[in-house]
Amino acid sequence: MVVSGFIKDTFAASRLLEFSANSQFIHLNYSLRILNHVESPNGFTWNTIMKANLQRGYPQSTIILYKLMLEKNFEPDNYTYPILIQACTALFSEKEGKQIHNHVLKMGFHLDVYVLNTSIKMYDVCGNLGHARRLFDESPVKDSVSWNSILAGYVKVGDVEEATSIFDQMPERNTIASNSMIDLLGKTGHLRDARKLYDEMPKRDMVSWSAMISCYEENGMFEEALEMFAQMKSEGVMVDEVVIVSVLSACANLLVIKEGMLIHGLAVRIGIESYVNLQNALIHMYSSCGDVKSSRRLFDASPFLDQISWNSMVSGYLKAGFLGDARNLFDSMPKKDVVSWSAMISGYAQHDRFLETLELFHEMQLEEIKPDETTLVSVVSACAHLAALDQGKWVHAYIRKNELKINPLLGTTLIDMYMKCGCVENAMEGFQGMEEKGVSSWNALIVGLAMNELVEGSFEKFSEMKKCGVEPNEITFVGILGACRHLGLVNEGRRYFESMIKTHNIVPNIKHYGCMVDLLGRAGFLEEAEEIIENMPMEPDVATWGALLGACKKHGNTKMGERVGKKLIELHPDHDGFHVLLSNIYASEGKWEDVREIRGIMKKQGVVKIPGCSLIEAGGVVHEFLAGDRMHPRIKEIDRMLDEMAKRLKMEGYAPDTNEVALDIDEEEKETSLYRHSEKLAIAFGIISINPPTPIRIMKNLRICGDCHNAAKAISRAYGREIVVRDRHRFHHFKQGSCSCMDYW
């Protein structure tokens, strides 16, 4: 054409340019060269090249060509501006969009319905729904696209009221509009309205069914989602990837693997099983139902894996309890996002692997990945379980420094952490600083105050909670009854238990009955405590029986203790605590033959006593001690401190309580055994590692024994140190020779 001169013919050149621009096999630069050869390009020519740039993903080039068009004094037409406005939409550029819109007004094309519709969409996509609405309201001509465009804007931002208003005014409610409304109503929890609209639709397409099924799935109505999917299939409606993903999610939540497998087979038959979103849904479904082998087979066989695929597989392993497999896969991930880290950290925390939780969080910080609220909740929870106050404070400081929002869950977890570390003031400050205080936040405060022996404070917060209009729940009363049992407030406990039932209409659960048994048993009302157990509407659990048996030992009721203990060993032959308690009851009476018999039964049945374990944090590191432990790297220094402590304590008038040792050995051996209890090892380490006035904070997995309790009081006086011990049930704050529990524990 160049040689023949036909390139100068505008019509011929335009057709060549159209062919070149629309061909995916010809580079756009060639089309631009053709444009440069055209002597008199018309509007069609410019529109063709601009549209080609837009369609091939070069919206900025479309804008540049428009500027070139204006420089060459060519006038755009009503087909030009929709292309340009779409380019601004693709660029999310409201600034350039407004400039183009001003040109539209200047050229008089603002009444063109196609220009109007693309302008409405542009402002909507760029987040200026107000401007889009003004354009819509001011337009004298509106077609179905205009109505659907403005409706889509309100659906996108979740504005039910305005979307409903637009929908009601529509001259013709087409299927697209109805589908959009169903989707919006479902996402905002208006299930009845969504179903009513669905039922009233004169014509439904696949999207209508999919939208309604998604409504059910997103609102936790999983059985309804499956029922509707079955109806959809029975009516012969074609299904796509979107609806199958929703239905697989419902199967995962209902743990119905058979139905999930049938849907998997359907996806294979219609040829969509390789879609990555569907692969991810299948991986999630199988792992949620406990079939991680099938999940892994899908994962390994998939040619397309995205970040969700990796995260889903890691989460599947964690949910099934395969922490090692989860960690191996996590370590091999090509890229880890905050979801990956959060899943792994939360998995460790949920499986009580708290040290690994903190270690992995530190790795996350080195990778400079910003944690989300879920991650921080798991980390703070781990600090609470390990009594790792320094690390917990560091996390709290990190939250403040990075101005992260403390939602109710994170705020409650921080309160719980400080309370479990014995830092009541920090917990109270955190509570006061919370913007939203739900019942769980109040519960953490009430339970924490009771645990730290601040019983009156617990009662006061309970009253304040009700004044603030927050209704107490089951957990609240576990805290209140726990406060009563810590100080032996029997009458108050009975009153709160009665008010829970009669005033607050809360049906007592096993924990409430357990608190009452423990309260009455500690106070010496053993017969009444046993009567509660016999009349409970449910089977008593291990903790409830243990409370009664412990009370028998405390009050020296050997007859009841032996009867209850033998019964419990028959019911729970593998429970070490019952064997040990009964053994201790015999030992306190000097019945060594009976002690040996119990130990023989334990050995025969393979029952192993859980060893005493104490944790202490020093210098940001958590140290673990077992009874009789000699594995610590500073054991020689600890031994020297134990010897010094023994001498100082004797000067203070302390004598080891050898009745606590359930062995028929000489007194010297008993004293040696007592001095190597895990909490004494931890205290000795604390004295040499933690400088005063910082308290020595210890967490023990079992209840502190009577001898260690007496020793801790004497050590606090002899060394002038505050010692805080959190045992299985409560805190003991030792200061100047006394304990906050006032020896009632």
Image (tube, rainbow, N blue to C red):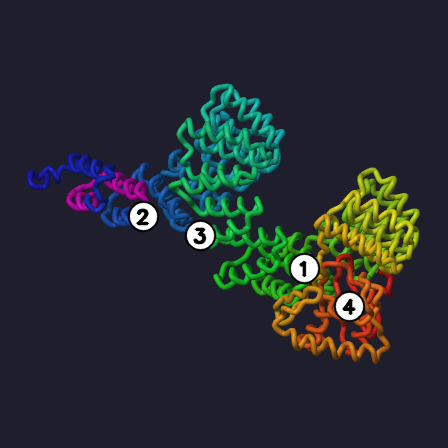
| Residue 220, numbered label | none
Residue 559: x, y in percent?
A: 91, 51
Residue at the far front in the pictured view: 593
Marks 3/4 in contact by CB < 8 Å: the verdict is no
Residue named by callout 2: 63
How much space separates mark 2 and mark 1, taking CA atoms? 58 Å
Residue 196: x, y in percent?
A: 60, 25
Marks 3/1 in contact by CB < 8 Å: the verdict is no
Dot 3 or dot 1: first in sequence order is: 3
Assess disc 3: are there few (<14), some (14-19) or many (≥20) residues with their C-alpha within 10 Å of its C-alpha: some
| Residue 333, numbered label | 3
In the image, taking residue 218 as reference, residue 744 lies left or right, namely right
* Residue at image location 66% in from the left, 75% down from the top: 689
Q: Nearer the viewer, mark 3 or mark 2?
A: 3
Q: What stretch is highlighted in magenta?
A: 31-58
Figure check: 548 above or below 633: above
Label 2's element?
helix
Q: Quadrant of residue 393?
A: bottom right
How much space separates mark 3 and mark 1, taking CA atoms? 30 Å
Figure check: 550 above or below 397: above
* Residue at image location 66% in from the left, 68% down from the top: 617
Residue named by callout 4: 674
In the image, taking residue 445 as reference, residue 92 lies left or right, namely left
Dot 3 or dot 2: first in sequence order is: 2
Q: Which of marks 2 and 1 is in front?
A: 1
Residue named by callout 1: 384
How much space separates mark 3 and mark 4, taking CA atoms? 50 Å
How much space separates mark 2 and mark 4, taking CA atoms? 84 Å
Q: Which of marks 2 and 4 is in front?
A: 4
